[in-house]
């Protein structure tokens, strides 16, 4: 089981990333489905069934995708550690020089870089060289199950917004009301994703909102073809 007290900042950001992406996909896919079905039929029950089915599908799809992706990352990190173990046995001096070069690049003087490298090679060569070569903390591997549950929950919660608004809003404002709800939700996920990545918030929000509007318009008119 995961030790919650030892989750690193990188792991926490990975969980948040999975959550934001899951939420965004949940909003977009469910909005697309309910707009298309609502345009094709006047049955609220049909819209609800289509929406809930898509909500479950996107939640499990996001979860399985995250599991495969993060599991691959975890396997890659473990393989890198095993490779580094062999390097330390076969070419310890080359690894020492690698550490020295890494510290020189950080602006450390050559004499101090040599001292640090010698200390690392003497006391904890594997941990130190893995960190310098790959940026990996031994034992601090990403947990695929954290990403799975984060993306599944977020996708489900994201999809609830268009599903409920399209199902329960009054008929005369159902379409426009759902479009407003979806736009707000996508703007929020765009803001959060930009904040996590220290990127400009305006373009991120705009991209999300435009993607949502295009999705709703396209699926709505496709639905009209079958009305």
Image (tube, rainbow, N blue to C red):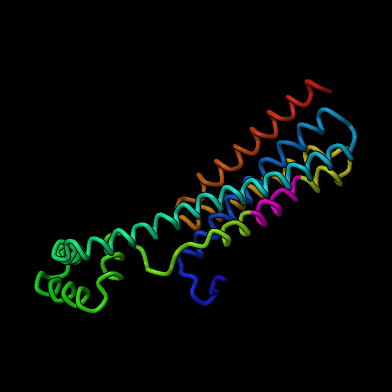
**Can residue 207 be seen at all in this image of the molecule?**
yes
Does 133 appear above or below 169?
below
20 horizontally vs 131: left or right: right
> How far from the left and from the top, in percent, is residue 75?
43, 56
Camera-nearest residue between 35 and 154: 154
Please give the name of the residue rendered at 50% of the width and 57% of the height, measured from the top-left corner: 195
The quarter of the rendered structure image containing the C terminus is top right
- Residue 159 drawn in magenta: yes
Picture quadrant of residue 51: top right
**Can residue 184 be seen at all in this image of the molecule?**
no
The residue at the far left in this view is 111
Q: Which residues are magenta?
A: 152-162
76 horizontally vs 120: left or right: right
Does 146 appear above or below 208?
below
Please give the name of the residue rendered at 19% of the width and 65% of the height, measured from the top-left corner: 99
Does 181 appear above or below 132?
above
> How far from the left and from the top, in percent, is residue 196?
49, 58
Please give the name of the residue rendered at 12% of the width and 72% of the height, measured from the top-left corner: 114
The quarter of the rendered structure image containing the N terminus is bottom right
The residue at the far top in this view is 225
Picture quadrant of residue 222: top right
- Residue 216 drawn in magenta: no
137 horizontally vs 71: left or right: left
Camera-nearest residue between 105 and 196: 105
> How far from the left and from the top, in percent, is residue 54?
74, 42
Labels in figure, total: 0
> How far from the left and from the top, in percent, is residue 133?
27, 60
Prevailing SS of the magenta stretch: helix
């Amino acid at each position: 089981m995961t030790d919650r007290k030892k989750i690193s900042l990188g792991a926490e950001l990975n969980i948040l990333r999975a959550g934001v992406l899951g939420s965004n996909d949940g909003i977009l896919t469910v909005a697309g489905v309910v707009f298309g079905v609502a345009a094709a039929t006047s049955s609220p029950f049909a819209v609800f069934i289509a929406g809930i089915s898509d909500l479950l599908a996107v939640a499990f799809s996001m979860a399985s995708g995250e599991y495969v992706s993060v599991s691959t990352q975890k396997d890659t990190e473990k393989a890198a550690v095993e490779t580094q173990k062999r390097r330390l046995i076969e070419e310890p001096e080359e690894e020492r020089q690698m550490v020295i070069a890494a510290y020189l690049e950080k602006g450390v003087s050559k004499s101090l870089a040599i001292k640090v490298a010698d200390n690392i090679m003497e006391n904890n060569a594997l941990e130190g060289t893995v960190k310098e070569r790959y940026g990996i903390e031994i034992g601090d591997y990403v947990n695929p199950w954290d990403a799975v549950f984060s993306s599944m929950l977020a996708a489900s919660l994201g999809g609830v917004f268009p599903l409920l608004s399209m199902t329960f809003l009054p008929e005369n404002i159902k379409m426009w009301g759902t479009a407003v709800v979806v736009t707000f939700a996508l703007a929020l996920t765009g803001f959060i994703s930009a904040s996590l990545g220290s990127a400009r918030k305006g373009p991120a929000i705009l991209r999300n909102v435009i993607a949502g509007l295009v999705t709703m318009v396209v699926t709505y008119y496709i639905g009209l073809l079958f009305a």
